[in-house]
Amino acid sequence: MTPEHIDRPAILAEVTAAFYRYEQALIGNDVEVLDELFWHDKRTVRLGAGENLYGIDEIRAFRAARPSKGLERELRNTVITTFGDDYAVCSTEFTREGVEKIGRQQQTWVRLPCGWRIVAAQVSLMS
């Protein structure tokens, strides 16, 4: 891949919009949008601070059971990088009010016929 294929402005804008749409859905507990933005496939993976979810069905069950309060967070050090027209990585740190630990989140996004979708996500907490 050549440098001119990395972070093309139009593609970067699309992924950035999808990432922040996900973030708004996350803090608003909009399960419908969260579900929409994950690839609906058994190969989709979400590894969290306390869960390892393999496949869209496990991710959906996790979302349905998750409490809807205390989801607000502040992002920092967000980096979104696109590679070509169909692949992107989004990395960020986050903090929650009253919580000392810093969280990290990384998502792999792929453009599918239905639009940009998360195919792999990882969330962790640092001390």
Image (cartoon, grey):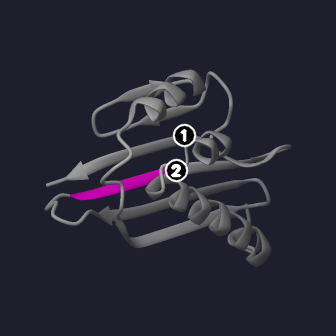
- Which residue is the site of mark 2? 107
Q: Quadrant of residue 19?
A: bottom right
Residue under the point 74% across and 78% down? 9
Residue lying at the far bottom in this picture: please name it: 9
Identify the amino acid type marked 1.
Answer: Ala
Report whether 37 appears left or right of 68: right
SS category of the residue bearing label 2: strand
Residue under the point 39% across and 73% down? 77
Is residue 1 shown above or below 111?
below
- Which residue is the site of mark 1? 120
Q: Quadrant of residue 48?
A: top left
Cβ–Cβ under 8 Å for marks 1 and 2: yes
Closer-to-camera residue (16/88): 16
Q: How far from the left and from the top, in percent, is residue 10? A: 79, 74
Residue under the point 49% across and 43% down? 121
Magenta stretch holds residue 104: yes
How far is mark 1 from mark 2, CA to CA? Answer: 6 Å
Q: Residues within 10 Å of mark 2 (few under 14, many from 20)?
A: many
Is residue 75 shown above or below 70?
below
The magenta stretch is 102-106
Q: How far from the left and from the top, in percent, is residue 13? A: 71, 73
Q: Main secondary structure of the magenta part?
A: strand
